[in-house]
Image (cartoon, grey):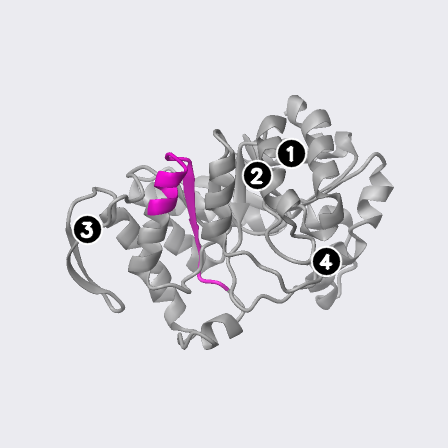
């Protein structure tokens, strides 16, 4: 099982030293990958640190790729804010800069404002995402290709460099519609902070869809991380994000516990984290991406502790 990290390229906690300067240390510590989010007109959500700073993900990943030699780079996830051909060209160039270390992550996005300010009808984001996925595959040969879709109508287009054939493509989400898109266009799912009580049935359905189309689908997860020397300290330091994750159950009249958000979070001391990582592995999840956003000020310390006390045991 690979373990990756969401890069701190957003909020007031984003500094050059933390984002770019620390990247070689992330590699040295033994993490497999680093991942960037995608937004325009960014504003913090309930589990995000304060601030409006947000570095564009392709620029972010290119900078980190240039400072490292082994780390894979990916998106959690690239959303259809760009014309599909522009997105295809950006990803091909990024893969070339990273010497083939790119993993593509795509999704349709959520907040409406970023689409509104670009003049993109909100409903169109689904078709734009699907056509982007198709174009990435078509361009991978490096030869001229044609495509006639709803949003792209192109003849004899060449994108060189292109994303190489066989580059992993993840889909961000696990709703029924997301699973159908993942099985049709991608190699697996990389949902965001999804409890096992939701994820397990989605994984079963994805496997069924993959079997029906002759594909072996991969499973990933982006999980909120809070590691500390003591279990209670780790929980207390993310009490507000945990409460936000538990709110849907409260809305249903259920008083939730930490067990109800298992899978969405990796929280506790090092022994707790080892046990929780084993739960991912037992489900066939082969890539877990750790998200430190709720404790951005502890980003470096948490990654060091996890690398020293958890990675060697998993």
Determine which residue is flagged by label 4: 246
Q: Residue at x 40, y 74 (%)?
A: 120
Q: Indicate which label's residue lies in the foreground, 4 or 2.
A: 2
Which quadrant would residue 26 be assigned to in this image?
Answer: top right
Tell whether label 2 touches label 1 (CB within 8 Å).
Answer: yes
- Is 229 inside the magenta-drawn segment? no
Q: Residues within 10 Å of mark 3 (few under 14, many from 20)?
A: some
Screen quadrant of the N terminus: top right
Contact, mark 4 vs mark 1 (Cβ under 8 Å): no
Q: What residue is at 40 percent from the left and 62 percent from the top?
A: 80
Residue 277 has which mark? 1
Q: Secondary structure at mark 1?
A: helix
**Distance between the alpha carbons at the discs numbered 4 and 2:** 21 Å
Q: Mark 4 or mark 3, which has the lower sequence index?
A: 3
Left or right of 47: which side holds 26? Answer: left
For the record, the magenta segment spans: 93-109
Label 1 or label 3, whichever lies nearer to me, is 3
From the viewer's perspective, is residue 249 above or below residue 232?
A: below
Determine the CA span between mark 1 and mark 3.
43 Å
Question: Quick one: SS at disc 4?
Answer: helix
Nearest to the eye among marks 4 and 3: give it: 3
Give 105 or 41, whichever is nearer the viewer: 41
The dot on residue 288 is 2
Element assignment for label 3: loop
Q: Position of residue 181 (x, y in %)?
A: 38, 55
Q: Nearer the viewer, mark 1 or mark 2?
A: 2
């Amino acid at each position: 099982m690979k373990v990756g990290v969401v890069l701190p390229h957003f909020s007031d906690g984003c500094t050059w030293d933390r984002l770019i300067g620390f990247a070689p240390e992330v590699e040295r510590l033994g993490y497999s990958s680093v991942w960037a989010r995608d937004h325009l007109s960014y504003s913090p959500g309930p589990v995000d640190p304060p601030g409006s700073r947000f570095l564009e993900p392709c620029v972010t990943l290119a900078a980190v790729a240039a400072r490292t030699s082994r780390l894979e780079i990916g998106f959690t996830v690239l959303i259809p804010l760009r014309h599909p051909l522009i997105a295809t060209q950006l990803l091909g160039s990024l893969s070339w800069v990273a010497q083939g270390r790119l993993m593509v992550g795509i999704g349709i996005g959520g907040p409406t404002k970023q689409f509104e300010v670009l003049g993109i009808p909100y409903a169109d984001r689904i078709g734009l995402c699907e056509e982007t996925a198709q174009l990435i595959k078509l361009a991978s040969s490096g030869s001229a290709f044609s495509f006639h879709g709803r949003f792209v109508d192109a003849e004899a287009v060449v994108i060189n460099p292109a994303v190489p054939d066989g580059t992993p493509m993840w889909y961000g989400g696990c709703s029924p519609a997301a699973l159908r898109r993942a099985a049709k266009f991608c190699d697996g799912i990389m949902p965001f902070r999804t409890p096992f009580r939701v994820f397990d049935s989605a994984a079963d359905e994805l496997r069924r869809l993959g079997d029906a189309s002759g594909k072996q689908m991969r499973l990933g997860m982006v999980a909120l991380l809070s590691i500390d020397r003591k279990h209670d300290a780790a929980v207390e330091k993310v009490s507000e994000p945990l409460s936000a994750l538990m709110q849907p159950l409260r809305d249903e009249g259920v008083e939730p516990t930490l067990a109800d958000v298992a899978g969405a979070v990796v929280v506790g001391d090092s022994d707790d984290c080892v046990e929780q990582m084993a739960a991912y592995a037992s489900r066939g999840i082969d890539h877990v991406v750790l998200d430190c956003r709720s404790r951005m000020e502890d980003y470096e310390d948490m990654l060091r502790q996890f690398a020293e006390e958890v990675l060697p045991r998993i």
